[in-house]
Amino acid sequence: MFIIVVSLLLAAAMGGPVLFYYMGRPSRVRGKWALAVNLVSFGAVFLLAVVFLFGQTAFGSAEAAVVSDLAVAAAFIGAALVTGLCSIGTGIAVSSAAAAAIGAISENENNFGKAMIFVAMAEGIAIYGLLISFMILGRV
């Protein structure tokens, strides 16, 4: 029953601002308000779902600690999100940095080292994401 209620709240949180945007005359200000309401309501519903689904405390000794299936699923989802979002961020950063590096190298070949440092810094985002996802999966 709780999952149905959360699913309906989530659908209303995502669908309500879209309906608000398209019911009137679409404009930039109306779109910004719809996006802000969408993000705030989605965050509130997500926080509510996390608190009620994963907020149960297990009592007992450390040896007898039992990890629920929902906690394992949340760990896998979290690791996937970290890896995916860091990869997307790396792709965006490398596309900008590599284009600028190629332009700088074509004008002056002495800029190769400096340009590659910025491209490598962008690649570090993906490495940090992988490290965090390994840390998350190591606790499961």
Image (cartoon, rainbow, N blue to C red):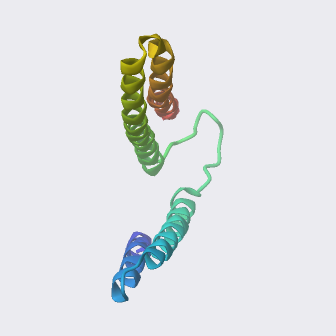
Q: Is residue 47 left or right of residue 9?
A: right
State the residue at coordinates (54%, 56%).
Answer: 54
- Residue at image position (37%, 89%) is 24
Q: Residue 29 in the image: x percent, y percent?
A: 48, 77
Marks counted in the figure total 0
Establish if 86 lies above or below 10: above
Locate residue 50, reporting x and y percent. Answer: 53, 59
Q: Position of residue 89 (x, y in %)?
A: 43, 40
Residue at 45% x, 40% y: name it.
Answer: 82
- The residue closer to the viewer here, 70 or 80, is 80
Judge by depth and name the residue closer to the eye, 15 or 133.
Answer: 15
**112 over 13 or under it: above or below:** above
Q: Nearer the viewer, residue 44 or 57?
A: 44
Tell me: residue 55, above or below residue 128.
below
Rendering quarter of residue 28: bottom left
Residue 15: image location, x then y, percent? 37, 76
Which residue: 51% across, 25% down? Answer: 121
Which residue extends farthest front? 107
Q: Quadrant of the N terminus?
A: bottom left
* Residue furthest bottom as drawn: 24
